[in-house]
């Protein structure tokens, strides 16, 4: 009850008198009674006396504590641990062999050039930096792709992958009421939040087969076939997060067949272009194949991983339409959605991307650095497999580690086993069994293998 403190404020000397004294003879506890119905009443006026009701009950009392984020919350827990062997394999962020964050040399160079140019900090247009939007679509679809030449792509700069997905989700909610988004099971921890918050209904299609620690291709196809016609099928362009398991090129072909047959709309989340294989073109092959079939496609991009621009929040949403007129209309609506959400996007990351891609020397350097990062992750993957295979005498087949690609490995460890990894071994990871190999060094592979083997065999 909010009756712990009543104070009076007034321009009159009687201000210091208590409520009852002021209102002698016509004692009116109206205010207090009203408090009973509304504990959040702040102020009441009684003629020239204004009464302020201060309360120790917060206006925000009804708000419960949110759970920690399943991915970013892991980093917070890691920071709070002071064990010397602790290892953060939670968030997908690239680290050097010394396990330090890495700023690409090419980004430092581009930054220096930007400073020398002395660009202004005026607002960007709602759709973002034109030079960025041009190069980001070209990187994804290929500069010679007819859809670009025919101006059939609506590209809007987004706040990295998440912000770009959120724009597309809002577009779906507004223009495809009731349409479902199909999401892989499992998927990146934030996908469901994005569609929930955008009020877009979703359901899951089978993806991961725990028996083989591989792709449940039949299940995937069956579920996509069974979805109501015209559903949006969310696909990971490359390096599926969290499993690291991608369809083969042939399987991609079958997925495209089914999506086409059912008149579904492919919706790509491509957050690792160039970072999975080391080649921008190879990693964009799935998206390009769907576009080459003449399909309308949505694709959300991110430059967090491949350019290490995590904190710049730079990415884009692209909607490939069947006509330039449709693309223009879609773009206008994406801008309409963005304006009341965040007005217009930040400029710095967009300039960095545009300058690197627009300069052939810097572009070459970026490709080399991307290859180096992808190569380091591949080396760590091999070393981890070697360590697991040589240390584990049980005969368990750990070769699935080598079959996965990208920055993650999906270990198949259950929640209790993941808890053991953290509580006993100080290895921080998401509770779905995912480890970020980008946060692992060659030197730590043996320690990690010990932790995995112990958790796998000794915890049920
Ligand atoms: C991840 O999956 O770890 C990254 O994409 C970071 C994030 O935002 O969740």
Image: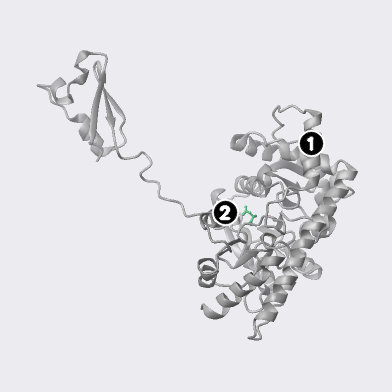
Q: Residue at x 79, y 56 (%)?
A: 274
Which type of secondary structure does the marked residue at label 1 adopt? helix
Where's the N terminus, which quadrant?
top left
Q: Residue at x 75, y 49 (%)?
A: 307
Does the beta carbon of the residue at mark 2 sit less than 8 Å from ligand 1?
Answer: yes
Taking the image as four quarters, which one is ligand 1 found in?
bottom right
Residue 162 is left or right of residue 40, and the answer is right
- Residue 17 drawn above or below residue 296: above
- Residue most toward the left? 25
The mark lying in front, picked from 1 and 2, is: 1
Taking 454 as reference, is 313 above or below it? above
Residue 207: image quadrant is bottom right
Q: Position of residue 288 (x, y in %)?
A: 82, 56
Residue, x 82% and y 57% (percent of image)? 371
Q: Which residue is denoted by mark 2 in the rendering?
A: 72
- Residue 44 shown left or right of residue 426 in the figure: left
Q: Is residue 325 in view from this perspective? A: no
Tag 2: Cα neighbours inside 10 Å, few (<14), some, or many (≥20)?
A: some
Q: Is residue 345 left or right of residue 38?
A: right
Disc 1 to disc 2, C-alpha distance: 30 Å
- Figure quadrant of residue 294: bottom right
Q: Of label 1 and label 2, which has the lower sequence position?
A: 2
Looking at the image, which is closer to me, 37 or 308? 308
Q: Position of residue 83 (x, y in %)?
A: 54, 61
Q: Secondary structure at mark 2?
A: helix
Q: Position of residue 455 (x, y in %)?
A: 56, 75
Tell me, for residue 112, which label it has, or none. 1
Can you tell which mark lies on residue 310?
none
């Amino acid at each position: 009850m909010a009756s712990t403190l009543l104070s009076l404020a007034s321009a009159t000397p009687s201000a210091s008198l208590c409520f009852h004294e002021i209102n002698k003879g016509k004692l009116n506890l109206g205010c207090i009674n009203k408090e009973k119905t509304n504990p959040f009443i702040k102020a009441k006026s009684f003629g020239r006396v204004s009464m302020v009701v201060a309360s120790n009950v917060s206006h925000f009392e009804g708000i419960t504590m949110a759970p920690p984020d399943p991915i970013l919350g892991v980093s917070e827990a890691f920071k709070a641990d002071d064990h010397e062997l602790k290892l953060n394999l939670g968030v997908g962020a690239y680290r050097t062999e010394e396990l330090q964050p890495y700023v690409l040399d090419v980004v430092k160079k581009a930054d220096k050039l930007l400073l020398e140019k002395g660009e202004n900090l005026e607002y960007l247009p709602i759709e973002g930096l034109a030079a960025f939007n041009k190069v980001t679509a070209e990187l994804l679809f290929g500069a010679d792709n007819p859809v670009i030449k025919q101006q059939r792509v609506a590209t809007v700069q987004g706040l990295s992958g998440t912000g770009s997905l959120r724009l597309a989700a809002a577009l779906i909610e507004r223009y495809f009421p009731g349409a479902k988004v199909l999401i892989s099971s499992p998927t990146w921890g934030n996908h469901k939040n994005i569609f929930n918050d955008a009020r877009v209904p979703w359901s899951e299609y089978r993806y991961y087969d725990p028996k083989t620690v591989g792709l449940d291709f039949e299940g995937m196809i069956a579920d996509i076939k069974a979805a109501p016609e015209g559903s949006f099928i969310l696909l990971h362009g490359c390096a599926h997060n969290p499993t690291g398991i991608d369809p083969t090129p042939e399987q991609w072909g079958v997925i495209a067949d089914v999506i086409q047959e059912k008149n579904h709309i492919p919706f790509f989340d491509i957050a690792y272009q160039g970072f999975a294989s080391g080649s921008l073109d190879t990693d964009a092959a799935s998206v390009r194949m769907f576009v080459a079939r003449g399909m309308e496609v949505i694709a959300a991009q991110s430059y967090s991983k491949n350019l290490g621009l995590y904190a710049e929040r730079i990415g884009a949403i692209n909607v490939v339409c069947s006509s330039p007129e449709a693309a223009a209309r879609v773009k206008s609506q994406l801008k309409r959605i963005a304006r009341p959400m965040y007005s217009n996007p930040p400029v710095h990351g967009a300039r960095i991307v545009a300058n690197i891609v627009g300069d052939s020397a810097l572009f070459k350097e970026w490709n080399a650095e991307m290859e180096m990062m992808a190569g380091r992750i591949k080396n760590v993957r091999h070393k981890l497999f070697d360590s697991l295979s040589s240390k584990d005498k049980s005969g368990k087949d750990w070769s699935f580690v080598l079959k996965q690609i990208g920055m993650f490995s999906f270990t198949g460890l259950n929640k209790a086993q993941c808890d053991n990894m953290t509580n006993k071994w100080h290895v921080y990871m998401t509770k779905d069994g995912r480890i970020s190999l980008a946060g692992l060094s060659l030197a730590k592979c043996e320690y990690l293998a010990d932790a995995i083997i112990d958790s796998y065999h000794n915890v049920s």
